[in-house]
Amino acid sequence: MGDRAADRGDLARHGPADLGGHGPADLERHRDELTGYCYRMLGSGFEAEDAVQETLVKAWRGLDRYDPGRASVRSWLFAIATNVCLDMLRGPQRRARAMDLAPAAAPGAGLGAPLPEERWVLPLPDGRLPPPDPAELAVARETVRLAFVAALQRLPARQRAVLILREVLRWSAAEVAGLLGMSVAAVNSALQRARAALPAAPDTSYEEVDEDLLGRYVDAFERYDVEALVALLHEDATMAMPPYTWWLRGRDAIGAVLRAAGAPCAGSRLVPAGRANGAAAFGQYREGRPFALVLFETSGGLVTGQTTYLGDRLFPMFGLPMSSSPRLRTSG
């Protein structure tokens, strides 16, 4: 998709006179909202950022053809972003979570072969999204959860766009019809099919991350106190470790694996990295080197899910250093 740094430089160098009366800020102020849309469409923070950058570059290069009488800058940008995402979604495979790809593993089962990055729903720092309207906080948070983003990937691309625009971003059927070149009836029909295909509507009983619980869990994790860790897990908690389809369900299964594992993570350090997909994110370091990005989901005073993204690829996106020695900063 070209050199992103060069594209950003091009945007910065052009002013209102160059862009038909619209400066780069008129486009850039929509970046976070576009990122949220593209992320839900694509299921990857990396791809979402690429899609948004391509959208903004296409927009400033085509501003001489923009007609403010036909659409607002926001609607015009979303139309470009939709086309960019649809082009990126032409491949046959969809992104998913481990629990969408295989049944829960039994304690003692092998990890199996890793899958390539393009098969996985990847996290996005909450800080890359626009601040939610307080009245829509629950919907905004729940519709970026990993489970919901993974469920979206099951939908055909245009149905996915309709559902996100209508249910998440609250566009009217007429607005969506104009953006996608569909009739209002076709939009409503696509929305009904998308709703029926999803396993369930987003849970709107959003809870803030339990900081006290996280503190106790991180302390137990860094001491590798298995009994303390297990005591803080929900009875139906899950544990996954992309890029492997191996995953566990249930406090007993997780406890059995941790007890039999021989303390492979003993001595690890967890560094806070803000929030991602409504969950608490941490960089895990082993012997001072980045090992994994870990997301913890909590509810009712217990940890309900742990997803460990092995490797260091996500560390720069979350503002995490490539060593646990320097002064740390967090993102998200």
Image (cartoon, rainbow, N blue to C red):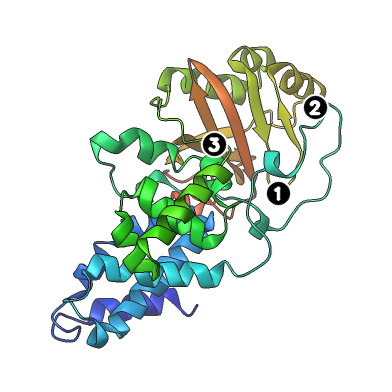
- Helix, strand or loop at mark 1: loop
- Residue toward you, 105 or 224: 105
Q: Nearer the viewer, mark 2 or mark 3?
A: 3
At x 20%, y 81%, the residue is 67
Mark nearer the N terminus (1 vs 3): 1
Residue 26, given in percent of the width and then of the height, sits at: 20, 69
Place of residue 80 in the rendered image (x, y in percent of width and height, measured from the top left): 37, 72
* Dot placed on the residue nearer the N-terminal end, 2 or 3: 2
Q: Is residue 105 above or below residue 163?
A: above
Amino acid tagged 3: Leu
Residue at x-position 55% and y-position 43%: 196
Helix, strand or loop at mark 3: strand
Mark 2 vs 3: CB contact within 8 A: no
| Quarter in which the C terminus is drawn | top left
Give the number of the disc on residue 171. Answer: none
Under mark 1, the amino acid is Pro
**Does label 1 or label 2 sit earlier along the sequence?**
1
User: Which amino acid is tagged 2?
Assistant: Ala
Task: Report if residue 332 is visible in the image.
Answer: no
Residue 290 can be seen, yes or no: yes
Q: Which residue is mark 3?
A: 295
